[in-house]
Image (cartoon, coloured by chain):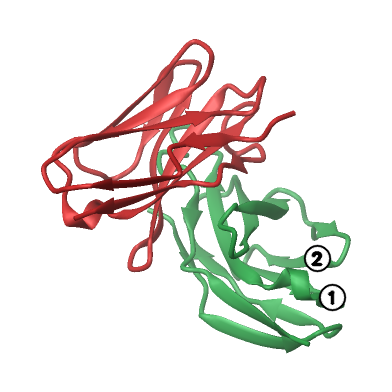
Amino acid sequence: AQTVTQSQPEMSVQEAETVTLSCTYDTSESDYYLFWYKQPPSRQMILVIRQEAYKQQNATENRFSVNFQKAAKSFSLKISDSQLGDAAMYFCAYRSLETGGGADGLTFGKGTHLIIQP
Amino acid sequence: KAGVTQTPRYLIKTRGQQVTLSCSPISGHRSVSWYQQTPGQGLQFLFEYFSETQRNKGNFPGRFSGRQFSNSRSEMNVSTLELGDSALYLCASSEGFSYNEQFFGPGTRLTVL
């Protein structure tokens, strides 16, 4: 079974600065997706960014970008110019694409609580 | 388009009872997945439905079941409730299978007394 590890339970960053959230995963598969989800205090989970494992280019969405290192099984999220609205729990997630895979749906890490200091 | 809706938003039950939670996906979405979120275990996958068929099931006891209707709406049922079933239950929908972008609902907060 796949596992996703987020080693930082909590991170704090000053507004307008850059912060990087870490995520590592363990899998023997080669075809999969990786996701970063944001869960603000309102509790509605929102997709931040998605990376297909077969793509070497790192995904970018406005102020959010990832550093995907497939060999190292690492998938970190960088948030540039942090804003107060970025404060939330951030979850890293894995989804298998291989035949017979996906039996576990999305596998989530434990999450990182991001605090933005004004 | 309206987002994913879940009803009820809050629910209080006692041990031994059963409960049914409902999820209405975004219009046109055919895949619905359910997750349980607790402080201790985090987010755990329950099951996934696509076109009324259960495609995948997580590692939960048989007390947890679900179904999907022809209009893609989904229900999950928990029988013989235990204290440990207290959790936020999240539903997510996607156009195709759930490796496409999943859109989450606000969740149903279940408290078992």
Q: Residues at marks 1 and 2, common chain?
A: yes
Query: What is the chain identity of the residue bearing mark 1?
Result: A
Which color has been applied to chain B in this rendered view?
Answer: red
Question: Can I make out residue A8 in this image?
Answer: no
Report which colour depicts chain A. green
Quadrant containing the N terminus of chain B is top right
Is label 1 in a helix, a strand or a loop?
A: loop
Residue A92 placement, left or right of B17: right
Q: Which residue is mark 2?
A: A64
Residue located 71% across and 48% down the image: A54
| Local crowd size for mark 1, using a 10 Å CA cut-off: few (<14), some (14–19), many (≥20) | some
Q: Quadrant of the C terminus of chain B?
A: bottom left
Q: Chain of mark 2?
A: A
For badge 2, the amino acid type reads Phe
Please determine whether, in this image, residue B85 is positioned above or below residue A58.
above
Dot 2 falls on a residue whose secondary structure is strand
